Amino acid sequence: MVDYVTQGEECNNKADKMILLLFGSVSKHDDAVDFYQKSATEFKIAKSWDQAGPAYIKLAECHLKSGDSHEAAGAYVEAANCYKKISPLQAISCLEQGVNLFSNIGRFSMAARHCKEVGELYEQLRDFGEAIKYFGRAADFFQGEAATTSASHCKQKVALFFAQLKQYTKAIEVFEEVAQEAVNSNLLRYGVRGHLLNAGVCHLCKGDVVAVTNALSRYQNLDPTFSRTREYELLTHMKNKTLKSLLKF
């Protein structure tokens, strides 16, 4: 049976020695890259994630020394994929490195994708404040690349996190922004009613019935079909129930 961990350690040690002996040698640098790549692959096959992650980081650093930011970014992402199995925070650290490198070389679609990954990891950790930061940044990257559907998805996540943090005013602003953008897009128009419903529910969570009434009027102006939808009926029903509850006091 092949001992992938041992093979990985041997390759890693050879690469470390190559780095010490570099002194400007291109061939030794290439050899070090090859050995770190082989080392990381062997550890990955063995599912030795705590060894594969550092091996990919060494590979990334090796690429950076030769000025290959694209390959370095890819290696950091591979390291993150390994760390996801054992340490979300270490995965986040590696992904941040990858995002910054992809951004610096103008690979904004890749930066957006991995920025979103960071947001998802923070979501898993229930750190919604950081999740907002990274989903928002991903939305900006996607928007810059005209990836409107992906940008909209990220903004919706931002709005939901604001709502979970009970920052309802900010949630309303983002939901309404997403709805406004969706109205003007054939790809996204189907989601307008849901965004307006979410914004309306956030108004209700603030206990501001007047604001809900005004919002319903604005939403009708935004989407003339809204008053004929189940979402409108639900919001109206919830508004009336809230008003009755307030009048009891």
Image: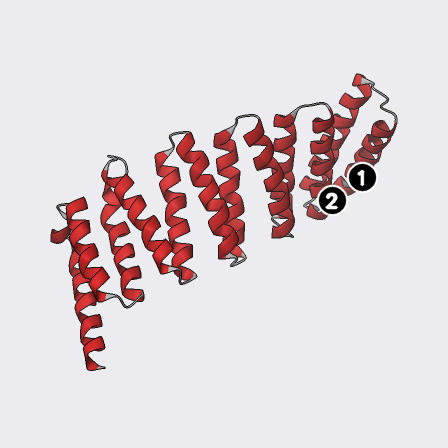
For marks 2 and 1, the one nearer the N-term is 1
From the image, tell me which residue sits under label 1.
Answer: 9
- x 54%, y 57%: residue: 125
Q: How many angstroms separate mark 2 from mark 1 (CA)?
A: 9 Å
Residue at the extreme top:
26
> Mark 2 highlights which residue?
51
- The quadrant in which residue 223 appears is top left
- Dot 2 crowding, Cα within 10 Å, few <14, some 14–19, many 20+: many
Amino acid type, callout 2: Gln
Quadrant occupied by the C terminus: bottom left
Does residue 205 show up? yes
Quadrant position of the N terminus in the picture: top right
**Image location (x, y in percent) of residue 200:** 25, 58
Residue 131: % across, % down? 49, 51
Q: Which mark is residue 125?
A: none
Q: Residue at x 71, y 46 (%)?
A: 48
Does residue 1 show up? no
Q: Give neighbour class at mark 1: few <14, some 14-19, many 20+ (Cα, 10 Å).
A: many
**84 relative to 144 in the view: left or right:** right
Q: Are marks 2 and 1 in contact (CB under 8 Å)?
A: yes
Above or below 154: residue 242: below
* Residue type marked 1: Glu
Residue 247 location (% of width, % of height) = 19, 78
| Quarter of the rendering containing residue 47 | top right
Tell me: residue 8, above or below residue 20.
below
221 left or right, relative to 55: left
